[in-house]
Image: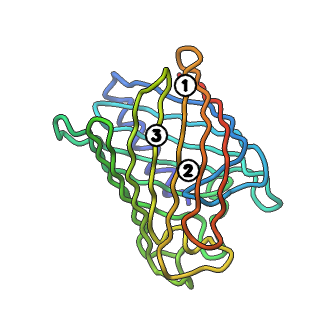
Amino acid sequence: MKKWYWILGIGLCGMLAYGQINFSGDVTLVSTYVFRGIKQCPGPSLQGTMALNYKGLSGGLWVSSIGTDDIDTETDPFVELALPTGEIESALGLNIYTYDFFSTFNDTAEYELELYANASVGMFGLSGYYVPSQKSTKGELHSSCYWLECNVEKELWGGTWSAQLGYGTYCSRYLSTPRKEPVGNLVLTATKSLTEGLDVSYAISFGLAKDMENIFVLSVSKSF
């Protein structure tokens, strides 16, 4: 996994060499960690993002505590490129999913790569994620998998209200009984800004398939 450290390191050094680098980040405490309708840990989780941005190119690391017997921390590097599409905000990106800094991902691989694209205009957004065939998918029902999301967001009554519908085969492999068929979930979220950069959110994730839970999540986030 040292090659990924080199690739990310070279990319970040290149961004720093050009100057005019912007740093952004956030720290979030959630009552439970839910990803695409699947609960990731038994209790509360502390999460954070660190990113460097330069003229539409960004790269960084997303971290979350897991706290299970086998895994302490999820550590996901990412790279994203904003596209020049005018009023439509769009981007292409790469996520690298791994645990404990490339120590493990599953029984067959130390990490998993995911490609994605997203676009938004006004209050509407659309995202697509694709996990190509690789070591991490060896022996699974799908050699590759996908996940699609569409969302709508509206400022109303002093807060931000959003609805997001997800659908695909990505989560099918993480059900108590893995399946080939795609599954879905619906997430409704209400967010209130307490002060500049400090938000509190309440979300409900509805599982739209057998073996998927309905999960309530409370979170407090500070961005900087």
Indicate which disc, 3 or 1, sits on the residue closer to the N terminus. Answer: 3
Residue depicted at 65% across the width and 72% down the height: 211
Residue depicted at 47% across the width and 35% down the height: 161
Front residue of 112/42: it is 42
Residue 194's x, y, as percent?
Answer: 59, 17
Identify the image quadrant of residue 128.
Answer: bottom left
Q: In this view, does 87 lie above or below 210?
A: above
- Helix, strand or loop status at disc 3: strand
Front residue of 200/158: it is 158
Type of amino acid under label 2: Asp
Type of amino acid under label 1: Ser
Front label number (3 vs 2): 3
> In the picture provided, is 30 more to the left or to the right than 77?
right
Residue depicted at 58% across the width and 57% down the height: 206
Indicate which disc, 2 or 1, sits on the residue closer to the N terminus. Answer: 2
**How crowded is the residue under tag 3: few (<14 C-alpha within 10 Å), some, or many (20+)?**
some
How far apart in space, not on screen, are marks 3 and 2 (Cα)? 25 Å
State the mark number for residue 162. 3
- Helix, strand or loop status at disc 2: strand
How far apart in space, not on screen, are marks 3 and 1 (Cα)? 19 Å
How far apart in space, not on screen, are marks 2 and 1 (Cα)? 18 Å
As drawn, the residue found furthest toward the top would be 195
